[in-house]
Amino acid sequence: MKIVKSGFLVGCVLLILACGQSNSNNSVSPTDTINVVAADTATEKTFAVSLVNNKKDPTCGMPVTAGIHDTTHYENKVLGFCSTECKNEFLKNPKANLAAAEIK
C-alpha cells in the first residue's frame, strides 16, 4: 500500500511540475505577428490638450490639438509631443527647441 501511495504522490508532483512548463517553439506564425501589432496599436496613449503648457510640438511644430502621444516635464512645465520620437529628439537639446513650443 505504501508503494501505491508513494507512486501516486510522485505522479501528482510530476503532473504539477509539468503544468508549469511550456512548449517553446521558436517559430513565429504570421498570425502571431498580426496579433502583436494589433495589441500595440490598441494600447496607444493620448493626452488631453488641457494637460500641457505648449501649443505646438517643440520638435516638429505640429499643433498639440492634432494629438498628444507623449509628454515630459521641463522647467516646471508639462510639454506635449505628437510622438515619442519627437520627445526624445527634444530631450537631446531642450533649450534649442523650447521656443518653437509656444508656451501658454
Image (spheres, rainbow, N blue to C red):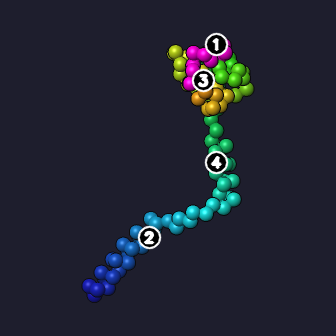
Under mark 3, the amino acid is Phe
Q: Judge depth for marks 2 and 3 and give the one in front.
A: 3
Q: CA distance from mark 4 to mark 2?
A: 29 Å
Instruction: Name the residue at 61% across, 27% down.
Output: 89
**Residue 18: numbered disc:** 2
> For the C terminus, which image quadrant?
top right
> For the N terminus, which image quadrant?
bottom left
Q: Which residue is mark 4?
A: 39
Q: Which residues are magenta?
A: 90-104
Q: Nearer the viewer, residue 24 or 17?
A: 24
Instruction: Name the residue at 38% across, 78% down.
Output: 11
**Marks 4 and 1: CB-CB under 8 Å?**
no
Q: Which residue is mark 1?
A: 99
Under mark 1, the amino acid is Ala
Q: Secondary structure at mark 4?
A: helix
Q: CA distance from mark 4 to mark 1?
A: 36 Å
Q: Which residue is mark 3?
A: 90
Q: Nearer the viewer, residue 72 or 100?
A: 100
Q: How many marks?
A: 4
Mark positioned earlier in the residue sequence (4 or 3): 4
Q: Could you tell whether 90 is left or right of 2 in the image?
A: right
Answer whether residue 65 is visible to the viewer in this image: no
Q: Secondary structure at mark 2?
A: helix
Principal SS element in the magenta part?
A: helix
Answer whether residue 62 is visible to the viewer in this image: yes
Q: CA distance from mark 4 to mark 3?
A: 28 Å
**Marks 4 and 2: CB-CB under 8 Å?**
no
Q: Judge depth for marks 2 and 1 and give the one in front.
A: 1
Q: Could you tell whether 48 is left or right of 22 in the image?
A: right
Place residue 70 in its image quadrant: top right
Instruction: Name the residue at 65% across, 20% down.
Output: 58
